């Protein structure tokens, strides 16, 4: 199990501009998709090391090695949920099963309805990055991303899409859905990287 910012006071665990919040609000763009297990799959493609597309159907994905992460979640809307226990498939497990090519530097994480978020491959490979199916021992609700949402605790939460369906490896950065609409391409909450005008 991985813990982030375990030491020190709770105030020190909050990035600049964030406030702690007990409730987990439902925030997303567009409707909640209807889950159809017989049609669901998870894919990894793009700049893979073998040049091939890798795919798991719903039953196969459930058989992948499981992991747990205890970490905080920081939303760009300035609330933070502390001490979440996530369970699912560690992102690094997917990177090991379907490795990126040596020149792959970034990834686009694709979700239902064409929603996307760009990340550095190193962000996916971080110890606490997880393709989550559960929070606090309970299966995610559809409103919170069931059957699968990405959680990247060291970045703002918009970098972890709900209803994830694919990871595309990239050899150069490309802006995702919110990044095209003015959000920061990296999204580090400890540096308050909220908006694109803050980019170097």
Image (cartoon, rainbow, N blue to C red):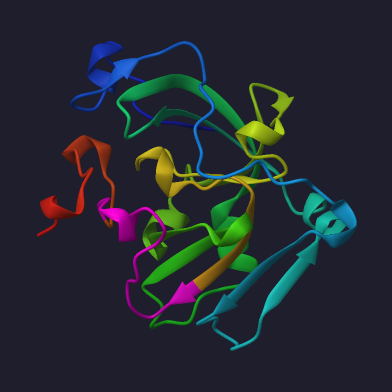
User: Percent from the top left, x then y, of residue 151?
Assistant: 51, 42
Residue 106 covered by magenta stretch: no
- Image quadrant where one finds the C terminus: bottom left
* Residue 21 against residue 175 in the figure, above or below: above
Task: Estimate the x, y position of residue 194 in percent, counting from the top left.
Answer: 23, 43
Residue 6 drawn above or below residue 63:
above
Q: Residue at x 60, y 87 (%)?
A: 50
Residue shown at 34% from the left, 65% from the top: 175
Using the image as rendered, state which of residue 50 and residue 115 is in the foreground: 115
Q: Percent x, y for residue 193?
A: 20, 44
Query: To which quarter of the image does residue 97 belong?
Result: bottom right
Report the side of 36 relative to 80 (left or right): right
Q: Nearer the viewer, residue 151 or 85?
A: 151
- Magenta stretch, residue numbers: 169-184
Residue 169 position within the rendered picture, expressed as x and y whole percent measured from the top left: 48, 74
Specify the principal SS of the magenta part. Answer: loop
Left or right of 102: which side holds 113? right
Q: How many marks?
A: 0
Seen at 25% across and 53% down, the residue is 182
Q: Dividing the image into 4 quarters, which one contains the N terminus?
A: top right
């Amino acid at each position: 199990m991985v813990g982030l910012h375990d030491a020190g006071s709770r105030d020190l665990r909050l990035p600049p501009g964030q406030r702690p919040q007990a409730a987990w609000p439902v925030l997303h763009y567009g409707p909640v998709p209807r889950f159809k297990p017989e049609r669901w799959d998870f894919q990894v493609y793009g700049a893979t090391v073998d040049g091939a597309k890798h795919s798991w159907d719903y039953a196969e994905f459930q058989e992948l090695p499981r992991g747990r992460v205890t970490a905080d979640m920081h939303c760009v809307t300035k609330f933070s949920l502390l001490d979440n226990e996530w369970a699912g498939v560690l992102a690094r497990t997917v990177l090991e099963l379907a490795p990126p090519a040596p020149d792959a530097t970034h990834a686009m994480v694709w979700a239902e309805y064409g929603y996307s978020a760009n990340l550095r491959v190193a962000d996916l490979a971080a110890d606490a990055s997880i393709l989550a199916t559960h929070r606090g021992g309970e299966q995610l609700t559809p409103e919170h991303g069931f059957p699968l949402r990405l959680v990247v605790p060291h970045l703002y939460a918009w970098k972890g899409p709900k209803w994830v369906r694919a990871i595309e490896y990239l050899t150069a950065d490309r802006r995702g859905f919110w990044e095209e609409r003015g959000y920061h391409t990296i999204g580090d909450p400890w540096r308050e990287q909220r908006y694109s005008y803050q980019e170097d």
